[in-house]
Image (cartoon, grey):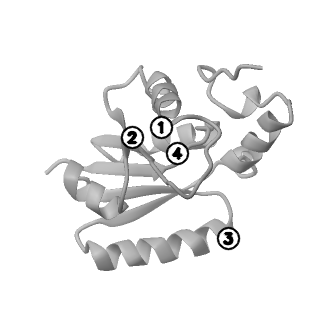
Amino acid sequence: MSRIALFPGSFDPFTIGHESIVRRSLSLFDHVIVAVGQNSTKANLFSLQQRVSWIKEVFADTDKVSVSSYSGLTVDYCKEVKARFILRGLRTSADFGFERGIGQVNKALLPSVETVFILALPEHSAISSTIIRDIIRNGGNASQFVPDVIKFDK
C-alpha cells in the first residue's frame, strides 16, 4: 500500500517553511499531495488558482509531489485521494497545541489516517503566511520568505 500524505493548508502565500516541510517529508512518504483548502471564511490575498500554480512551480522538479485544491473536511479529501497520513508543520509550541486538537478530531472522524508532525527548521520558525501577507500589504519585500519562483506584483 502506498504511503500517501496530504499536506493541507491555505498557503496564502506558500512560504519557504512550507517548502521545507514538504521536501523533508519526501523520505517518509511515497507521495505528498499539497492540498490548497478553499475556506470561505478567510479573505485570501491571492486567488486559489494563483496559489495552486505557484506551488506546482515550486515542485516541478519532482514527481513525488502533486498539488490540488479541495473544500470541505480534510479527512473526506483524504478518503478521496487515498491518503493515509496528514502532514503538518510545527513552528512553535502554540502550533502543537492547536494542531494536536485538530489531529485528535481527525483521528476520531477517520481512524485509518495518522497525523504526522515535522518540526520547522529554526530559521523558519518565525515565518508565517500571516506575517508575509502583512509585509506585502504594506509594500515590503517578502521575497526572502517565499520560494524563488513566487513573484509578487508591486
Q: Amino acid at mark 1?
A: Arg
Q: Nearer the viewer, mark 3 or mark 4?
A: 3
Q: Nearer the viewer, residue 106 or 37?
A: 37
Kindly report the distance in space between the C-alpha atoms of the residues bearing marks 3 and 2: 25 Å
- In what element is the residue under mark 4? helix
Is 109 above or below relative to 37?
Answer: below
**Left or right: where does residue 132 sit relative to residue 25?**
right
- In what element is the residue under mark 3? helix
Spot occupied by residue 100 in the image (x, y as percentages of width and height): 51, 74
Residue where numbered disc 4 is placed: 21
Q: Amino acid at mark 3?
A: Ala
Residue under the point 31% across and 63% down: 75
Residue where numbered disc 1 is placed: 23
Q: Nearer the viewer, mark 3 or mark 1?
A: 3
Neighbour class for label 4 at 10 Å: few (<14), some, many (≥20)? many
Neighbour class for label 3 at 10 Å: few (<14), some, many (≥20)? few
Kindly report the distance in space between the C-alpha atoms of the residues bearing marks 1 and 2: 5 Å
Q: Amino acid at mark 4?
A: Ile
Q: Amino acid at mark 2?
A: Leu
Is 13 above or below relative to 40?
Answer: above
Check whether the beta carbons of the residues at disc 1 and disc 2 lie within 8 A of each other.
yes
Kindly report the distance in space between the C-alpha atoms of the residues bearing marks 4 and 2: 9 Å
Is tag 3's residue or tag 1's residue first in the polypeptide sequence? 1
